Amino acid sequence: MSVGTLWIVIASLAWAASDALRKRLAGPMGPVALAWWMSVGSAPIFGLWVGLAEAGWPAPAYWPWAIAAFAGTLCATLLMLAALAVADLGVAIPMLALTPVFSALVAWATIGEVLDPGGWIGVVLVVTGAVGLQLHGRRWKPDRGAAMMAGVALLWSMTSVFDKVALQHAAVPAHAGIQVGGAALVLGPWLALRGRARDLLPPPGHRAAAVGLVLAFGLAFGAQLLAVQLEPVSRVETIKRAMGLASAVVLGRLFFDERLNVARIAGVTLMGLGAALVLG
């Protein structure tokens, strides 16, 4: 196993742990407070990285793209946490396989990037899998949390473009630190002004999980950034999505007593195969 592949596996496992902990904490803490906790908790980690890397201040051209990325990521994070509070982990996380589908379709519609036949087959498989995840017996019942996660996938498909352009004008550690620090600076005062300052800290009985979430999130984000420097993005995303789909179903069953049936397994499998085809 190459070093790059090892970082991909570490990032994928850390994201899986982060997803399960976010699912556990989304209800007790609420989306806004949980997003603030993740940001303020991981800010020292990325701040240390900036110092060790001696990353300089970004160029002026960085800021419009950074602000767009920040706004999209913040909205996606809040929407994701709200979805995890109401949806099964085994349904919510697999919907993120729609991200490369949306990215490919947006690129096709706006800049003329044409999908090959395998890519279009992948789109069909992902959409079919997403529909299959919401089957209840022979009856199809749209899941509100799954629809919210589809919105998250759409937002992430756009912010990935903003991130890519922003990183042409700033070092990776600086960009990561600015994004995380900005979320902490926005969400904390917003909650305080609404008289909800007490909500910023994890409630009793959930503090160990909250600390674990910060560590898992920091490891996942850092390992992923290291992985993309060593391996093609398509390889990183394919392995990450495949492991994320499988772990969401397994962890949902083990820790949240979520149902496991043929429709859910088939849906997750189709979405994983489809995402791999779209990513090439």
Image (tube, rainbow, N blue to C red):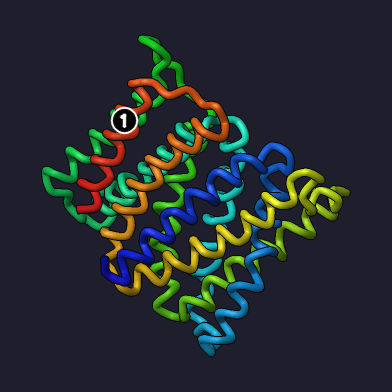
Horizontal arrangement in the rendering, residue 123 relative to residue 22 (left or right): left
Identity of the residue drawn at 24% across and 47% down? 276
Q: How far from the left and from the top, in percent, is residue 247?
A: 42, 42
Q: Nearer the viewer, residue 132 or 17?
A: 17
Identity of the residue drawn at 56% across and 82% down? 50
Above or below, 245 against 237 in this view is: above
Q: Quadrant of residue 48?
A: bottom right
Identity of the residue drawn at 41% across and 38% down? 95
Horizontal arrangement in the rendering, residue 177 relative to residue 273 (left or right): right
Q: How far from the left and from the top, in percent, is residue 52?
A: 55, 86
Q: How far from the left and from the top, in percent, is residue 166?
A: 45, 72
Horizontal arrangement in the rendering, residue 120 relative to residue 6 (left or right): left
Mark 1 Cα-neighbour bin, 10 Å: few <14, some 14–19, many ≥20: many
Q: Nearer the viewer, residue 64 or 116?
A: 116
The image shows a total of numbered marks equal to: 1
- Residue positioned most to the left: 117
Q: Quadrant of residue 132?
A: top left
Above or below, 184 against 273 in this view is: below
Q: Nearer the viewer, residue 29 or 59?
A: 29
Identity of the residue drawn at 79% across and 53% down? 201
Q: How far from the left and from the top, in percent, is residue 224?
A: 42, 64
Amino acid at dot 1: Gly
Q: Quadrant of the N terminus?
A: bottom left
Specify whether residue 55 is in view. no
Q: Secondary structure at mark 1?
A: helix
Q: Which residue is mark 1?
A: 129
Specify whether residue 134 is in view. yes
Above or below, 164 against 106 in this view is: below
